[in-house]
Image (cartoon, rainbow, N blue to C red):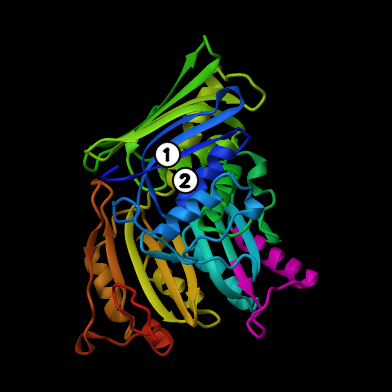
């Protein structure tokens, strides 16, 4: 087609095939503008209308060849994407799973917890190669890749791994008081080191694991938002509204899930992940979006046991889990990005500066690119109010020679976030203890993240 590329898939059906196909497209940072899925009677037929990250049809033949080669193969034999470095929302993410030790953490969140985790890893002499963390509904999920700082190899000693697990578990459980009626399983298996349960560490596999960890700590319990009402989420900023509903199709014994919300990249991946993790099979589906940036998804599902779920309690659980899956990635607040010379304890120092300046990290994507560390944090005021941009500029001055790119994330529109980029000139800088701490370690960088040679 003129404005998009059509991907058609015909195959013998197998459990999880739809998710595998969507993962292939997601790892290439493609937007699924429209899709039709049918997998009844043992046959799988999909049609996806996809666009690249610039909203254009695919022109790169290497990408097209990769899609043709990857879709339909097993995960073990899927080739590497043509571009090993994937950029998601301008945040660098790399694949370090085979080279380093993976750590998974989940539990009850609190202000400053991500900073405490970073400090604990530094105290344990763990070099942080990559880390991704989501915070939602007072829950935290985190996947990190670490190495030994002296050898830059995986940490494999069982005693050392046990010590890391124990130390991080203590950090996660510190000052955590379980609310009345809160399920006890929320504190089970809070920290796991070694093998990565999500498979090889492609971007989508890491994010799928974050979804699974969030589901395991029941982040769907409690209000999805301060403005949540019933099964529809109303965002008063700009009148955005999310509605998830379920109805019965008695003739075919399906449950029909309908989702309407603000459109965004990876939305289909997030909802399919959740239905898959809840043991639901998608037999038919259609996804689309309109010119106003609204997304519409319809899934015909049955439970893995072959039966539809028609009880009100089960419907409510599916609705709440899908609402949570959609909300996890919507990070309101301010996005801070910086590039620095990587070193042991860098992440701990940066997050401590943020915490001591009254900012809570609600989402983090940190990776290494050669000798550089690329850090991206969604932050908000620790009291939950909107981050004051004047305060951010003041903090930037206090950080001495450090330059930050500041992007105010406007969730009320469907256009790109409002960008506010300020470079602090030498005569504007003021000295303070945290600035002195970071002054010699963090290098100035270009706001467009051009590689520093």
Q: Is residue 152 part of the magenta span, yes or no? A: yes
Q: Give the magenta-colored segment's residue range.
A: 145-174
341 lies above or below 280 = below
Where residue 337 sits in the image (x, y, percent)? 36, 69
Q: Is residue 182 part of the magenta span, yes or no? A: no
Which image quarter: residue 15?
top right
- Residue 241 falls left or right of residue 14: left
Image quadrant containing the C terminus: bottom left
Which element type, helix, strand or loop, lies under badge 1? loop
**Residue in the image at 42% along x and 47% along y:** 266
**Residue in the image at 23% along x and 70% along y:** 421
- Residue in front for this viewpoint, 383 or 18: 18
Where residue 271 sits in the image (x, y, percent)? 47, 38
Sequence-earlier tag: 2 or 1: 2
Where residue 93 sits in the image (x, y, percent)? 47, 65
Which image quarter: residue 144?
bottom right
Where residue 324 sits in the image (x, y, percent)? 46, 40
- Residue in front for this viewpoint, 59 or 149: 59
Q: Residues within 10 Å of mark 2 (few under 14, many from 20)?
A: some
- Residue in front for this viewpoint, 226 or 7: 7
Image quadrant containing the N terminus: top left
Q: Residues within 10 Å of mark 1 (few under 14, many from 20)?
A: many
Task: Name the residue tied to disc 1.
Answer: 224
- Residue 444 falls left or right of residue 413: right
Q: Residue furthest top?
A: 251
- Residue in front for this viewpoint, 6 or 416: 6
Which element type, helix, strand or loop, lies under badge 2? loop
Which image quarter: residue 425?
bottom left
- Tell me, for residue 137, which label it has, or none: 2
């Amino acid at each position: 087609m003129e404005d998009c590329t059509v991907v058609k898939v015909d195959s013998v059906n197998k459990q999880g095939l739809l998710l595998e196909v969507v993962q292939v497209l997601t790892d290439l940072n493609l937007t699924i503008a429209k899709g039709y899925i049918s997998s009844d009677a043992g046959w799988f037929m999909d049609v996806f209308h996809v666009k690249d990250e610039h909203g254009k049809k695919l022109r790169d033949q290497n990408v097209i060849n990769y899609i043709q080669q990857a879709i339909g193969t097993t995960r073990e034999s899927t080739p590497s994407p043509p571009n090993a470095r994937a950029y998601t929302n301008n945040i660098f993410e790399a694949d370090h799973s085979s080279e380093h030790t993976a750590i998974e953490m989940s539990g009850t969140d609190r202000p400053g917890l991500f900073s405490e985790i970073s400090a604990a890893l530094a105290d344990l002499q763990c070099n942080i190669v990559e880390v991704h963390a989501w915070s939602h509904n007072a829950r935290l999920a985190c996947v990190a890749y670490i190495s030994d700082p002296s050898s830059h190899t995986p940490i494999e000693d069982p005693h050392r791994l046990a010590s890391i697990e124990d130390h991080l578990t203590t950090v996660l459980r510190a000052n955590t008081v379980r609310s009345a009626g809160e399920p006890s399983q929320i504190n089970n298996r809070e920290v796991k080191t070694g093998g990565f349960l999500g498979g090889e560490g492609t971007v989508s596999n890491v994010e799928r694991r974050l979804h699974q960890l969030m589901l395991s700590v029941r982040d769907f319990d409690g209000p999805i938002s301060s403005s949540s009402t019933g099964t529809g989420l109303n965002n008063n900023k700009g009148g955005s509204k999310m509605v998830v509903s379920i109805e019965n199709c008695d003739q075919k014994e399906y449950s029909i899930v309908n989702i309407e919300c603000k459109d965004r990249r990876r939305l289909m991946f997030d909802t399919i992940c959740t239905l898959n993790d809840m043991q639901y099979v998608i037999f038919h589906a259609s996804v689309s979006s309109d010119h106003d940036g609204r997304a519409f998804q319809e899934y015909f599902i049955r439970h893995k046991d072959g039966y539809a779920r028609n009880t009100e309690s089960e419907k409510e659980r599916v609705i709440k889990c899908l609402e949570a899956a959609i909300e996890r990635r919507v990070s309101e607040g301010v996005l801070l990005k910086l590039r620095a010379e990587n070193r042991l304890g860098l992440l701990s120092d940066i997050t401590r500066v943020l915490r001591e300046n009254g900012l809570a990290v609600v989402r983090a994507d940190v990776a290494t690119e050669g000798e550089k560390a690329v850090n991206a944090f969604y932050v908000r005021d620790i009291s939950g109010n909107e981050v004051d941009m004047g305060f951010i500029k003041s903090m930037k001055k206090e950080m001495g020679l450090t330059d930050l790119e500041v992007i105010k994330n406007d969730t009320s529109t469907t256009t790109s976030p409002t960008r506010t980029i300020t470079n602090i000139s030498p005569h504007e800088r003021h000295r303070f203890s945290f600035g002195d701490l970071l002054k010699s370690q963090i290098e100035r960088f270009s706001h467009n993240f051009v590689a520093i040679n």
